[in-house]
Amino acid sequence: TGQGWALEQFLSLSDCPGPQHDLGVLELGPTGSLHGRLLLPEGLSPGGLCLYLDTPRSSQKARVAANGRFELSGLTPGPHRLLLAHRQELSAGLPPLEFTIAPRDVTRIEWDVRLYSQCDVTLQLERHGSPWAGCEVRLIPEAPRSGGNPTDWEGANIGTTDENGTVYARVPAAGWAQVEAVANTQGSSALVAPVRVHLSCEPKSTAIIQF
C-alpha cells in the first residue's frame, strides 16, 4: 500500500446455508523494497528482461531497464527468491537469487549472471591472407572459471572451418580466449601456434583471425 504496509483481505468461504460474514482486513505489517542491478555479459542488453518472485502467494514481476536496474516494492519481510525469465543466451541452469527483506527498508543487490552466459560466435580464419578452409578449431578461455559452476569450461572443439574459413559455435562465455587451429594436410595434422581473440556476444559480429 501507499503507507508501506501489506494488507490482505480474508473472506468467508462456505457452502453451508446462512449468512456469510466478512472476516475483515488483516494487517500483516510493514513491507520493504528491493533495488537491484543485473550484470549481463558484454553485448547483451538487459532491457526488457523479466524478473519475478518465486513464491506461490505473489505474482510480482519487474522489468529490467536498459541500464540493468530493477525495483520491487511492497515485499513482506523475510527471505525471498528471485527468478530470471529464461533467455537463450543464458544457461537454463541459472539458479534463483536469494535475498532477505527488512521491514521499512530498501535491500540493494547486484545479480551477476555473467558466469551463466552463452554466446553465439562466428570466427573467420585466414592464413597468408586467404580463407583457411578445413582446419579444426579449438577455443581455450584465458581466465578459467572457479566455484564449481555448471557452465565451467576448460576448452572446446568448436568445429571445422568451411570453404570461407568460417566456423560457428555457441560457447559458455564472452571474453578473451586462445584460438588453436589444427591444419590437416596430406593425411597429417599439425597444431598451429594459438592466436588471442576477444569473443563478444554482440549479434552478427565476426572475429577475423589471421594465422
Image: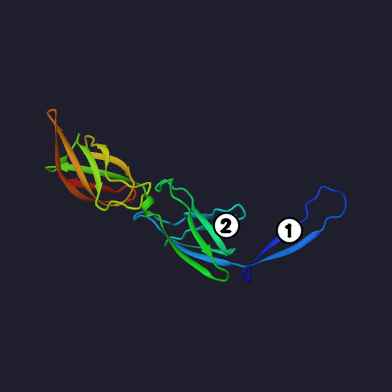
Residue displayed at 82% across by 58% down: 21
In which quadrant of the rendered view does residue 5 lie? bottom right
Q: Are marks 2 and 1 in contact (CB under 8 Å)?
A: no
Residue displayed at 17% across by 37% down: 182
Mark 2 crowdedness (10 Å alpha carbons): few <14, some 14-19, many ≥20: some
Mark 1 crowdedness (10 Å alpha carbons): few <14, some 14-19, many ≥20: few
Mark nearer the viewer, 2 or 1: 1
Q: Position of residue 121 (x, y in %)?
A: 30, 45
Q: Position of residue 167 (x, y in %)?
A: 26, 39
Tell me the number on the disc at residue 76: none
In which quadrant of the rendered view does residue 158 lie? top left
The amino acid beneath tag 1 is: Phe
Q: Quadrant of the N terminus?
A: bottom right
- Disc 2 to disc 1, how far (Cα)? 20 Å
Q: Position of residue 42 (x, y in %)?
A: 34, 56
Residue displayed at 14% across by 28% down: 187
Give the structural element (helix, strand or loop) at label 2. loop
Q: For this rendering, which residue is in front, 78 or 6?
A: 78
Residue furthest to the top? 187
Residue furthest to the front? 148
Q: Disc 2 marks which residue?
A: 60
Please determine whether, in this image, residue 74 is positioned above or below residue 206. Answer: below
Q: Is residue 97 left or right of residue 131?
A: right
Q: Quadrant of the C terminus?
A: top left
Tell me the number on the disc at residue 10: 1
Residue displayed at 79% across by 60% down: 22
Q: For this rendering, which residue is in front, 211 or 128?
A: 211
Task: Tell me which label, 2 or 1, sits earlier in the chain.
Answer: 1
The amino acid beneath tag 2 is: Gln
Q: Position of residue 132 (x, y in %)?
A: 17, 38
Give the structural element (helix, strand or loop) at label 1. strand
Q: For this rendering, which residue is in front, 143 or 63?
A: 143
